[in-house]
Image (cartoon, rainbow, N blue to C red):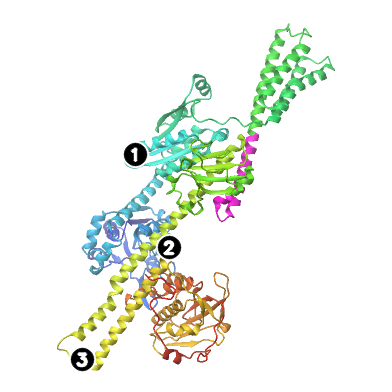
Amino acid sequence: MARGTLRIFLGSAPGVGKTYAMLREGHRLRESGEDVVIAFARDRGRRDTRALLAGLEQIPAKRVPYQGLHLEELDLAAVIRRGPATAIVDDYAHANPKGSPNAHRWQDVDELLDAGINVLTTLDIQHLASLSDVVSAITDVRPAESVPDEVARQAGQIQLVDISPELLRQRLADGKIVAADRVDSALADYYRPGNLAALRELALLWLADRVDEGLAAYRTGNGIDASWAARERIVVGLPGGPEGETLIRRGARILNRVNGGDLLAVHVRAAESAAAESPQELESQRRLVQDLGGSYHLVAGEDPAAALLDFARSVNATQIVVGIPRSGRLTRLLAGLRGGSTGARVVRDAGAIDVHIVSGPPEGRGPVVRRRQDLGRARVTTGFVMAILLPAVLQLLLAVNPDKNLAATVLVQLSGSVAVALVGGLWPAIVAALWSSLLVNYFSTPPLGNLTISDSENVLALLVFVGVSAAVATVVDLSARRSKEAALARAEAATLADLSRGAAGSEDTIVGLLQQALDVFQVRGAALLTRPDDDAFRAGAAATATATSGQGGGWRVVASAGEVSGVSPGAGDSPGIGGIHGENVERIDATTCLVLSGRVLPASDRRLLGAFGVHLAAQLERRQLLASRSEVLKLAEGNTMRTSILRAVSHDLRTPLAGIKLAVGGLRQEGVRYTREEEGELLATIEDCSDRLEVLVGNLLDMSRLTSDSIKPLLRPVRWYEVIPGGLHGIAPGRVRVELPANMPEVDADHGMLERVIANIVENAVKYAPGSDIVLAGSAGGLGPATASGRPAGELRIIDHGTGIPAERVVDMFRPFQRLDDATQATGVGLGLAVAKGFTEAMGGRLSAEATPGGGLTMVISLPLSSGVPFRAEPDQAPLVPQSAVIGRLHKPPLLASGTDPV
C-alpha cells in the first residue's frame, strides 16, 4: 500500500484562516469526486467555519476521560476503518491526553499516512520546535505544544495561509477569533502589530527555506549543475589575507542593490597555502560577514578555483566575488604556465555564474606572505659543510678504481647531492652539484687533470648531471620542508588542544588560557587588552577587568596572568601597536591585542601565537554572548513578571475590591435597615475580602522583591513550633493536624519568612485538597537530606491526601502565576508556592514536592540546622503543641517578612 501524502496549511498566528482554507480545499476535493471525511475539526465558535464543517462527512470524536472531564479527541481507529481517500485533521501540534495511543496528534497523522490515507492539517508557526524559543521571546508566551521540524518537512506540500497584521487585528476586533470579552486583552497582548509582523516574517522565511530545499533536491535529482537565479546568492572567495575584508564589503554592497539575498564567504584551505594564511584576519572576516548578515564557510581542497566553484554551484550561487593581485609580467607568465591565477580560472570555468574581479594591492605592497618554513640553522650549516666535503670524499673513493666509467661517476656524485639535499635543503644541494660537476670534469673526463672537455657528449653529460642534481635537490628540499611544516602543524594543533583542555578546567577560561600560554611560550607575563570604545562588545569581560593608570592610546587590560608589569598600556610613541609595551604584541582584531613579556618569540612561534590569539578572541566573544543572554533572560523574565502583575491587578485584585465596595455600599444605603445578623454578614464579607486583598498584595510585593534580589533574611535559631501558629492563621479549626515530635532541632531561619512559607503551602493544600486531612509532621529527630550548601537539614512535611500532581508538572507548579488544572483566578494569582520557594531558598534551604503514599502531595521544607546557641525552653513551652492550643493562640503574620527591605 502506498503511503499517503501530507498537506499542511501553515499560519503565522491563530485566526489567519488555516482551518477555513483547509475545509474549502476539502470541499473542492469532494466536488472533484474524491472521498473526503473530517477526522477531527472544530469550528471554535466561528460561523463561517461551522458552515463548512456541515457540508462534509464527519467521523464522531472519541470521548476520553481526563481529570474528571471528558475530552473529545481524534478516533484514530475509526478513521482507519473508514478508510477515506483524504482525511481532514485539524491542529497538527495538538498534545493528546494521557492514556491515548500516541502522545501527539502528528503521530496519529503519521499512522493515517501509513494506512495510505492522504491528510490535510493545520499548523501555526509558533508550534515548530526550532522556532518556539524565538516566538516565546517575541510574544512572552511559551508554546505548550510543538512539532519537530523534520516531521513538518516531510509534508508533500506546505501552503502558507497569509493575511496582513492589520487585517488579522480587524478580524479579531470583529469578534471572529476570540470571544468579545477577550478581544481587548488579545489586541493589547499577543496580537500587537509588532508581534504579528515578526511572526509573519518567521513564517515566510521558514517556508522560503523549505522551498530552497525542494529546489536543491530537484536540481540534484535531475543532475542540473547550472545555477538557477531563483534567489540572489553571492559567494565571496577569501584568500586568507587582509584583502578579504575588501571583498566581503564589495559583496555586501552588491547584495544591497537587490531586494533580499544571501551573502556567503568561503575560504578554501589548501595544503600548500595553509602556512600563508592569517588566522587573525580570517577570524576578523568571519565576524564581519556575520555582522553583515551572511555566513562563513571553510572548504578544504587542493585547487582553490575548483573548490570555490563547486561550493558556489552547490548553493545555487548567482554571483562570485574574487580578488586578483596586480602582479608583474614574470608573475603573470609563471601563473599562465600553471593554468592561470585563481581568479582567471574562476572566470574561465564559472559558466552561467557572474564573476566580479576585485583588483588587489600590487605585489610587494600587500600582505606579507610568510616565507617557507626554515629547516634550521644547524641543518643548513651541516648541509654546506657536506656540500664541500662529501663530493671530495666520493671522488677519492672513485679514484681507488680508475676503471670506473663516466656514467658510474656521475651517479655516485648524484647520490651525494641527494644526501646533501636531505640534510641541508636546496642551496647546499646546488653547491654540492656544482662542486661535484667540477670534480667529475677534472678527474673523470678527458683530458684528465684540467677543466677542458674534448668530447661534446661529456659536456652534455655534465649539464644533465647538474640539471638532474638541481631538480632532485628541489624535490627533496620541498618534501623535507613540507614534512617539517606538517610536523609543526601537528604540534601546533596538539598545543592548542592542550590549551583548550587546560582552560576548560579553569573557572575563568580566558585567564586559564593565559596561564597556559606562560608555559607554552616560556614567557613571564601575558595580558589581553581591548580598547574602551569596544566596551559594549566586551561587556562580559568587565568582571575581570584590571584598571590601569596609563592611557596607552585607549587600551585597557581585561585579563592577565603572570608578571604583567611589562605588559601595560603606554605612551603613544611606545613600542608595539598603538602605544602598548611588551616584547610580543599580537593584534587579534582592531580592538583586541595579546601581549607577552619576558622574551622575544622566534618567528617560528608567531603563527602559533596568532592562532592562540584567535582562540582567546573566541572565548571573549563567548563570554559576551553569555552575558548578553543572561541580560536578555532577565529582561524577558522581568517583562513576563510585569505583564502577569498587570493582569493580576486588572482582574484578581478587582474581585475582593468589588466585594468590599458592595458590602460597604449596602451598609451605607439609606432607608434600608439590616438585622444584627445581616450587618455581621456584611462586615464579615468586608473582613474576608480585605484579608484576601492583603494576601494578594503581600504575595505580589514578595514576588517583586524576589525577582529584584532585594530579599535579605535575618537568620537566627528558630524552632518549628514557634512559627506554625502564625503560619496557620485563618485556617478553620480542625482542618490541620500538627504532629511534631518532641525532639525537633532548631533551624537557621527568618521567623517572618518561615511563617509566610508555611502559610502559603497550607493555604495551597486547603485550596486544592478539599475535604482532605492536612498534616504538619517532622521526621524523628527532624533531620532531612543535606541542603544545597551541604549542611545537615531539618525538615517539616506538609501532607495532604488530595488528587496530587503529575511528576512532569512539579517544576511548573513552583513558577509564578501558575494554577493547577487552570483553576479559576478567584482562588488567587498563582504566586503562593513561587513565593514560598523563593523565601526558602533565600534562607539557604530547599522546598520540594513528592507524592503522598496512597495519593496526594507532600511539600517538604528543608532548612539548615542551627549552628548558634540553642534556645532554652521556657516553662510554658511544651515540646509538642496540640492543634487546639495552636488555634487558640493564633496571631496574624506581618505583611512584611522580618529582615526584608521595604518596597
Circle 2 crowding by C-alpha within 10 Å: few under 14, some 14–19, many from 20? some
Position above or below: 516 against 897: above
Instruction: Judge by depth and name the residue closer to the eye, 42 or 481.
Output: 481
Query: Residue sitting at 62 percent across and 32 percent down?
Result: 373
Q: Is residue 891 left or right of residue 445?
A: left
Dividing the picture into quadrants, the one containing residue 73 is bottom left
Circle 3 crowding by C-alpha within 10 Å: few under 14, some 14–19, many from 20? few
- The residue that mark 2 highlights is 107
Residue 583, horizontal then vertical, whole percent? 58, 38
> How many numbered marks appear?
3
State which region is magenta.
Answer: 483-512
Circle 1 crowding by C-alpha within 10 Å: few under 14, some 14–19, many from 20? few
Q: Residue furthest front?
A: 549
Q: Is the Cβ of the residue at disc 2 closer than 8 Å to that at disc 1?
A: no
Q: Nearest to the eye among marks 1 and 3: give it.
A: 3
- The answer to if 840 sits in the magenta stretch is no
Which quadrant of the figure contains the N terminus? bottom left
Residue 677, horizontal then vertical, whole percent? 25, 93
What amino acid is at disc 1? Asn
Secondary structure beneath dot 1 equals helix
Secondary structure beneath dot 2 equals helix
- The residue that mark 1 highlights is 256
Query: Residue sitting at 70 percent across and 17 percent down?
Result: 434
